[in-house]
Amino acid sequence: MYNVFYVCCTTNVMESQKSENTRLDNSTYNVMVALGREADFLHSTIDTYIADAQRENKTKLVEVWNNIKQDKQEHLDMLKNCLENEVEKGELNK
C-alpha cells in the first residue's frame, strides 16, 4: 500500500512541475492533460470494452459502456471548449 501511495504522490508532484516548465498556468495545463486522457480513453480503450461485452452477450454492460462513452465525449467537448475560449481570449499564457 505504501508503494501505491508513493507512486501517486510522486506522479502528482511531477505533473505539477511540468506545468511550471511549460509556461502554462496550472489550470490550462490541467485541461490539456485531461483532454489527452479523455481522448485516449475514447479513441483507444472504450470500443474494446464495448466489443468485449458484445462478444460475451452482456447487453446491459454494452449499454453502460456506451453511456460512459457518451458522457466522456461530453466531458471532452466541455474541456475543448474551455481551451478554445482561452485561446480566443488570448488567455493561454497568462
Image: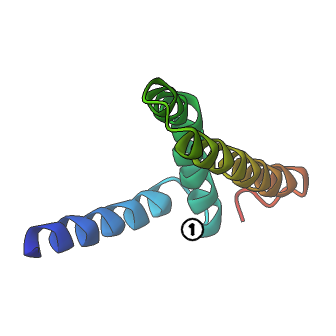
How many dots with numbers? 1
In depth, the one of 70 and 34 nearer the eye is 70
Residue 34: image location, x then y, percent: 57, 54
**30 or 50: nearer the viewer:** 50
Instruction: Residue 2: name its quadrant.
Output: bottom left
* Nearer to me, 20 or 84: 84
Left or right side of 15 for 23:
right
Front residue (pair 92, 37):
37
- Quarter holding the C terminus is bottom right
Q: Quadrant of residue 8?
A: bottom left
Q: Which residue is mark 1?
A: 26
Quadrant assignment, res 3: bottom left
- Badge 1: how crowded within 10 Å, few (<14), some, or many (20+)? some
Residue 23: x percent and y percent?
A: 56, 57
Left or right, residue 22 beside residue 77: left
Q: Height in image: 85 above or below 40?
A: below
The amino acid at mark 1 is Asn
- Relative image position of residue 68 (x, y in whole percent): 62, 50
In the image, residue 11 sits, relative to residue 39, either above or below, namely below
* Residue 17 percent coordinates (x, y): 38, 64
Q: Quadrant of the N terminus?
A: bottom left
Question: Which residue in the rendered view is the most extreme toward the left?
Answer: 2
Residue occupying image coordinates x 85% and y 56% = 90
Instruction: Look at 47% across and 63% down and name the residue there.
Output: 20
Q: Please give left or right for residue 18 compared with residue 10 in the image.
A: right
Residue 14 located left or right of residue 76:
left
Q: Residue at x 83, y 49 (%)?
A: 84
Q: Residue at x 78, y 48 (%)?
A: 77
